Image (cartoon, rainbow, N blue to C red):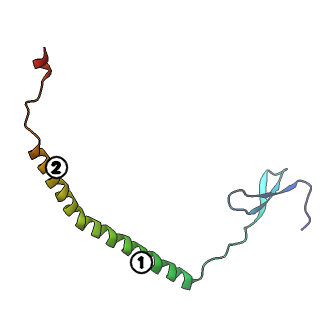
């Protein structure tokens, strides 16, 4: 089909489709979809899903292990703070009222 002088070829900035616009009509006359990129084949997709599943499982196991040891670490910190509190002398706190 011959192209008229009133027709413009415009490339869509979002999807890359080629639009033919008629200036006189102010409408899109035709469009051509952009070429499709390479899609991964199903064998590769299954492999990617398995790798992601293994990665999630490893992260979960690491989280479980850190939660198990977290209680021990907190109890050790508590015991040390308690030991320090017992070693410090007990003093009467000063109040603002007492300073006047």
Q: Are marks 1 and 2 in contact (CB under 8 Å)?
A: no
Is 78 situated left or right of 45 in this image? left
> Is 31 drawn above or below residue 50 in the view shown?
above
Q: Secondary structure at mark 2?
A: helix
The residue tagged 1 is: 54
How many neighbours does mark 1 have within 10 angstroms: few (below 14), some (14-19), or many (20 or more)?
few
On the picture, is 47 further left or further right than 82? right
Residue 96, x across and y down, in percent: 15, 20
Report the residue that reaches farthest toward the top: 100
Query: Is residue 67 depicted above or below 96 in this figure?
Result: below
Along the viewing direction, whichever of 23 and 58 lies nearer the viewer: 58
Occupied quadrant, residue 56? bottom left
Residue linked to disc 2:
81
Q: Nearer the viewer, residue 100 or 20?
A: 100
* Label 1 or label 2, whichever comes before in sequence order: 1
Calculate the distance from the C-alpha at mark 1 to the C-alpha at mark 2.
40 Å
Q: Of helix, strand and loop, which one carries label 1?
A: helix
Q: Where does the image place residue 49, in percent across and percent down from the top left? A: 47, 78
Please name whichever residue, 31 or 91, is drawn nearer the observer in this view of the structure.
91
Crowd class of label 2 (few under 14; some 14 to 19; many from 20; radius 10 Å)? few
The part of the image, by quadrant, that contains residue 92 is top left
x, y percent for residue 59: 37, 70
Residue at x 63%, y 77% (from the top left corner): 39
Which of the 4 image quadrants contains residue 89?
Answer: top left
Q: Residue at x 12, y 45 (%)?
A: 85
Residue 15 falls left or right of residue 71: right
Q: Residue at x 9, y 46 (%)?
A: 86
Which of the two discs, 1 and 2, sits closer to the camera? 2
Q: Residue at x 24, y 62 (%)?
A: 70
């Amino acid at each position: 089909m011959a192209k008229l002088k009133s027709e413009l070829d415009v490339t869509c900035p979002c999807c890359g489709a080629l639009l033919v616009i008629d200036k006189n009509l102010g409408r899109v006359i035709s469009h051509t979809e952009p070429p499709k990129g390479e899609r991964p084949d199903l064998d590769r997709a299954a492999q990617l899903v398995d790798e992601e599943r293994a990665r999630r499982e490893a992260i979960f196991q690491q989280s479980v292990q850190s939660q198990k040891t977290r209680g021990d670490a907190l109890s050790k910190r508590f015991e040390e703070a308690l030991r320090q509190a017992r070693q410090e002398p007990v003093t009467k706190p000063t109040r603002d009222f007492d300073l006047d």
